[in-house]
């Protein structure tokens, strides 16, 4: 596993998690929140709920032109800013690291093939709200399209490259590691950061 602490900041009892699609952001966030006794918020879960309310997939919402989904982005941004006023939170969200700069900023990386395999397994075994696919190849293509759309959208809206790993305090490549290993690595780094 590759993991490196990259930056040091003023410290708040908040962990923000961003990363590649399928890297395990939500699962890692839940595991960290449970281990620390913190609350958990997922903008991905919120986005999936919005997609379901509108009878759309995540891919369909991500394909909206920037101006057509601006109300969704603003709603999530405002929620993240409000959450940043609190403490004892784990937040998985593409932009939480920006709205809460004094959080411990974690980035989870995974390659596209592993991401597609994980997402397909989740769809097959458990269902995945707001997302479907009949093969690993279909999921990989949809994931690559979504990554391109999100990269362009965040660059247009905020001037931010959400995949620039130098913006984060810790980067973990999740390929080859189970959830408990990733969570333990993140937890140890967070505790060192917070106590330092």
Image (spheres, rainbow, N blue to C red):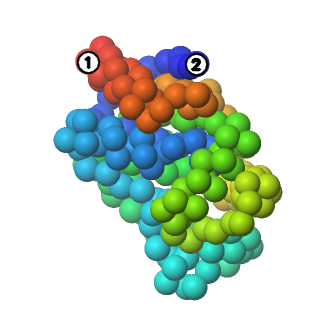
Q: Quadrant of the N terminus?
A: top right
> Viewed as shown, does residue 70 lie left or right of 185?
right
The percent position of residue 35, horizontal first and vertical second, equals 25, 36
Which percent across, then down, holds residue 88?
A: 24, 42
The vertical placement of 171 against 59, above or below, is above
Residue 75 in picture, x, y percent from top left: 47, 70
Where disc 2 sits, the SS reads loop
Give the number of callouts. 2
In the rendered view, would you say 63 is above or below 7? Answer: below
Q: Residues within 10 Å of mark 1 (few under 14, many from 20)?
A: few
Task: Please indicate whether residue 69 sits to the left or right of residue 169 in the image.
Answer: right
Q: Is residue 173 above or below residue 40?
A: above
Q: Which residue is mark 2?
A: 2
Q: Is residue 136 visible?
A: yes
Query: x and y percent of residue 174 in the render?
Result: 56, 31
The structure residue drawn at horizontal position 74% and vertical position 60%, both measured from the top left corner, is 135
Tell me which label, 2 or 1, sits earlier in the chain. Answer: 2
* Picture residue at 57% right of the left edge, 62% below the top: 123
Identify the residue under disc 1: 195
Residue positioned 34% across, 41% down in the render: 31
> Within 10 angstroms of label 2, few (less than 14), some, or many (20 or more) residues?
few
Q: Considering the numbered disc 1 on the image, is that residue within a helix, a strand or a loop?
A: helix
Give the label on residue 160, or none. none
Image quarter (top left, top right, bottom left or bottom right) of the C terminus: top left
* Residue at far left of view: 37
65 vs 165, left or right, is right
């Amino acid at each position: 596993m590759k993991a490196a602490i990259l930056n040091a900041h003023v410290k708040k009892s908040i962990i923000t998690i961003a990363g590649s699609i399928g890297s395990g952001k939500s699962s890692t966030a839940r595991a960290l929140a449970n281990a620390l006794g913190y609350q958990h918020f997922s903008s991905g879960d919120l986005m999936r709920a919005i997609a379901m309310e509108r009878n759309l997939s995540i891919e369909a919402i991500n394909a909206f032109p920037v101006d057509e989904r601006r109300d969704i982005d603003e709603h999530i941004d405002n929620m993240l800013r409000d959450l940043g006023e609190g403490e004892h939170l784990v937040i998985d969200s593409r932009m939480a690291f920006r709205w809460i700069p004094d959080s411990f900023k974690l980035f989870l990386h995974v390659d596209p093939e592993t991401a597609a395999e994980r997402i397909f397994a989740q769809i097959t075994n458990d269902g995945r709200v707001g997302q479907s696919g009949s093969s690993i190849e279909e999921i990989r293509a949809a994931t690559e399209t979504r990554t391109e759309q999100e990269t362009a959208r965040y660059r247009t809206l905020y001037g931010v490259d959400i995949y620039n790993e130098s913006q984060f305090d810790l980067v973990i490549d999740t390929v080859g590691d189970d959830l408990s290993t990733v969570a333990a690595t993140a937890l140890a780094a967070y505790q060192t950061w917070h106590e330092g």
